[in-house]
Amino acid sequence: RDTLVQTLRATRTALIIGGLTSIIYIPIGVLLGIMAGYYRRWVDDLIQYLYSTIASVPEILMLVAILMVLGKGLGTMSIALGITGWVGLARLIRGETLRQTEKPYITAAKAMGQSDWKIITRHLLPNVMHLVVIKFVLGFSGLVLTEAVLSYLGVGSPIGTASWGGMIDASRSELSRDPVVWWNLTSAATALFLLVLSLNIFGDSLRRAFDPRQT
């Protein structure tokens, strides 16, 4: 097989996984995070209990368990990653929402009789979107790495789907040959490194642009 073609096809797989998973976990994390920070009391306690329970289970074990139940596939992998991926975003959004609700513009909106829905959608949501954008970019690289790990363990992408983790897994036997077949491992690892590095640099640039403390 052409190693370059396999590497480029695996890039498509990584982008699909990252995109589909982000579509799943971002709305869940934003919704639950804002609800916990805005309503507080028993709503906050319930949501904190939920994500604390999920966070207490090792992520890789939960992912493997979900994939063993749902089966292999890019869609099921995205669902599994989405189930475990919203926890960090919900915590981040909750903390920012708690800070925003103490500001005068939220007090003024409540005094004017605006509904909770309008306050959340027109005031709170726009003020936490910069965190969502940064989390999306930085979390994308984590999703790519997780997909590679799951494919390496044999529970990730289905057979026939190009994947960097699958290429690295397949290269284990090739490294014992004489002469050593090293280019599959090198190509997949280099592509994985370059994509994660570029996403981290882009995410760090967004953080500096949106964070007023960096001025």
Image (spheres, rainbow, N blue to C red):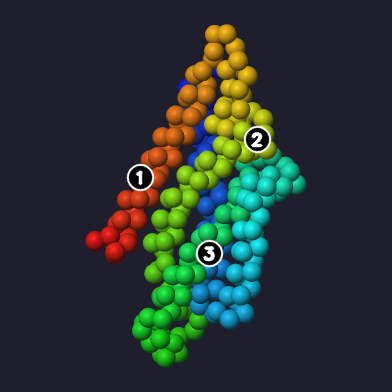
- Which image quadrant for residue 211? bottom left
Q: Mark 3 points at which residue?
A: 90
Residue 127 percent across, percent down from the top left: 39, 69
Q: In the figure, 136 relative to 115: above or below?
A: above
Q: In the figure, 51 relative to 141: above or below?
A: below
- What residue is drawn where x is 37% and y is 81%? 103
What whole-number distance in Å separates the C-alpha atoms at marks 1 and 2?
Answer: 28 Å
Q: Residue furthest left?
A: 215
- What residue is drawn where x is 62% and y is 50%? 59
Q: Residue furthest right?
A: 69
Q: In the figure, 74 relative to 58: above or below?
A: above
Answer few, some or many: residues within 10 Å of disc 3's Cα (few below 14, many 20 plus, some between 14 and 19): many
- What residue is drawn where x is 57% and y is 32%? 165
State if disc 2 and disc 1 touch (CB < 8 Å).
Answer: no
Q: Can residue 95 be seen in this view?
A: yes
Residue type at tag 1:
Ile
Q: Mark 2 points at which residue?
A: 153
| Residue in the foreground of this view, choosing between 20 and 41 | 41
Q: Which of marks 2 and 3 is nearer the N terminus?
A: 3
Q: Which of marks 3 and 1 is nearer the N terminus?
A: 3
Quarter of the picture holding the C terminus: bottom left
Answer few, some or many: residues within 10 Å of disc 2's Cα (few below 14, many 20 plus, some between 14 and 19): few
What whole-number distance in Å separates the C-alpha atoms at marks 3 and 1?
Answer: 23 Å
Q: What element carries label 3?
A: helix
Residue 90 percent across, percent down from the top left: 53, 64
Residue type at tag 3:
Ala
Q: Mark 1 points at which residue?
A: 201
Q: Is mark 1 on a helix, strand or loop?
A: helix
Q: Is mark 2 on a helix, strand or loop?
A: helix
Residue type at tag 2:
Leu
Quarter of the picture holding the N terminus: top right
